[in-house]
Amino acid sequence: MKKLNIIIIIVSDTRTTTTDKSGKVLKKSIVESGHSVPDIKIVTDDIFKIRHLVSQYLIDDDIDVIITSGGTGITGRDGTPEAVRVLLDKEIEGFGELFRSISYQKIKTSSLQSRALAGVANSKFIFVLPGSVDACSTAWKEIIQFQLNSETRPCNLVMLMPRLKE
């Protein structure tokens, strides 16, 4: 399996490195899957600060994947999808659809409030996840870990990485 470097960005006005649980759960799951997490960053719910931080990792040759957690709801401060979507070269619509479908099994119609999304920017995959521990765990364990495993068949996102610069 190809080992990837995955950066985690927590979007929150209230969480700190001490109180953040979602980032810790994601990091544990990612490392257990054989990948590396060089860092977990926390940024406030500000579209331009989020966009700035994500952009820094888009030009970092050592990072393969960016995962954000938080800011995907529909309140006034939730702006992660707006911050990230404009940076994408291509959106992977199926991710959000599949995530909401899986979430529906657990939280029923409340899943419609999630604006989770994924895409490709500068030959890197970006996943925009809700901030709850359960949402992060579900996204990783049910979808992302398989698509970032080069051994998943019939296909996976890793096998597309060399072709993203075409």
Image (spheres, helix red, strand yellow):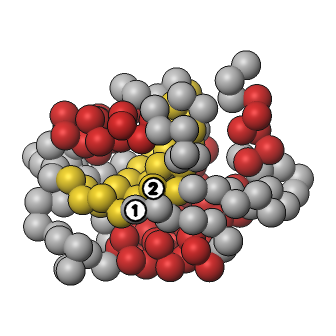
Q: Are marks 2 and 1 in contact (CB under 8 Å)?
A: yes
SS label for mark 1: loop
Q: Is residue 123 left or right of residue 121?
A: right
Q: Is residue 162 left or right of residue 121?
A: right
Residue 150 is marked as none
Above-or-below relation of 115 to 2: above
Instruction: Name the residue at the right extreme.
Output: 154
SS label for mark 2: strand
Q: CA distance from mark 2 to mark 1?
A: 6 Å
Residue in the picture at 88% in, 53% down: 154
Q: Measuring from the top left, give residue 63's x and y in whole percent.
A: 53, 47
Categorize mark 2 by other alpha carbons within 10 Å: few (<14), some (14-19), many (20+).
many
Q: Measuring from the top left, give residue 1's x and y in whole percent.
A: 80, 63
* Mark 2 or 1, nearer chain start: 2
Q: Measuring from the top left, give residue 163's x and y in whole percent.
A: 76, 29
Residue 147 visible (yes or no): yes
Residue in the picture at 18% in, 60% down: 12
List the residue tagged with mark 2: 7
List the residue tagged with mark 1: 39
Categorize mark 1 by other alpha carbons within 10 Å: few (<14), some (14-19), many (20+).
few
Instruction: Name the residue at the top extreme.
Output: 166
Residue in the picture at 52% in, 24% down: 89
Above-or-below relation of 104 to 162: below
